[in-house]
Image (cartoon, rainbow, N blue to C red):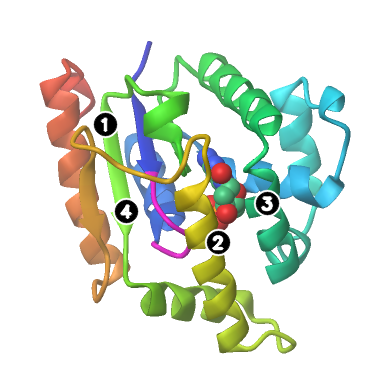
Amino acid sequence: MKPVVAIDGPAGSGKGTLARMIASHFSFVYLDTGLLYRTVAFLNAPLTELKDIRKLLDITAKLTEEQLRSPENSARASDIAKNPEVRDIMTHLQRDFIQLYNEKGVVLDGRDIGTVVVPDACCKLFVTADLKERAKRRFADLKNENTTFDEVYNNMKLRDAQDKSRKIAPLTCDKTYIVIDTTGQSVQESFKICREEVKKAFVNSGYGSFV
Ligand code: DC
């Protein structure tokens, strides 16, 4: 079994970008678990159809950024993420993904990766930033003329509240996480900090050969 890196944090914190960079640096496989929730929200498919992680990844790959990341679908994803049946199925599918790639090393990012999906991950990062800065980043990413900054900001504020307050698997971190606050940092600065933290965690958990 190769190392698993769990990265959690709120929307727009930079966790996806950093997770991708960490995966590429260590030649690990990356899974954006938020995209899976977004696909399920967009499809509105019966839960019984969600059995195979490969199938779900194929469907996700066929949807556009616009379809998945629109403010409407973001709100829908946060909504369905409150459903215990959805969460249970998604947790199993994410664990299947880890099994599938356990010879390569895996980086997953989301809201409950280190608390529920892989609590024994050898490295857990909680990536966060100011709400205003996160909304600015998301607004710049969207490139959608029909969406205003205020809409993105309010949508994100609501999602933060929903993700943190839901009864099952809320967005939270404890002392098993290393907190990375990316407010005011460049991507390269944050990446350097994360990379060093991941290396330290690998050494501490007996995965020193990966450093
Ligand atoms: O990371 P994201 O913004 O793309 O995630 C979209 C929504 O999916 C988010 O509002 C909450 C939900 N989500 C979750 O509940 N658990 C995860 N592991 C990932 C995402």
- Marks 4 and 3, Cα distance to the nearest angstrom? 22 Å
- Marks 2 and 3, Cα distance to the nearest angstrom? 9 Å
* Disc 2 residue lies near ligand 1 with CB under 8 A: yes
| Above-or-below relation of 205 to 79 | above
Q: Which mark is residue 123?
A: 1
- Marks 3 and 1, Cα distance to the nearest angstrom? 28 Å
Give the residue at x 32% y 72%: 130
Of mark 2 and mark 1, the one earlier in the sequence is 1
Q: Magenta residues, as a range?
A: 8-13
Inspect the image, locate mark 2, and give the three-letter code of the amino acid beneath it: Arg
Q: Position of residue 21 (x, y in %)?
A: 38, 50
Q: Is residue 96 left or right of residue 77?
A: left
Q: Which mark is residue 67?
A: none
Label 2: how many Cα within 10 Å (few below 14, some 14–19, many 20+)? many
For the residue pair 177 and 160, the one nearer the viewer reads as 160
* Disc 4 residue lies near ligand 1 with CB under 8 A: no
Q: What element does badge 1 sit on?
A: strand
- Marks 2 and 4, Cα distance to the nearest angstrom? 16 Å
Inspect the image, locate mark 1, and give the three-letter code of the amino acid beneath it: Cys
Which residue corresponds to mark 2?
Answer: 159
Q: Position of residue 150 (x, y in %)?
A: 57, 87
Which residue corresponds to mark 4?
Answer: 127
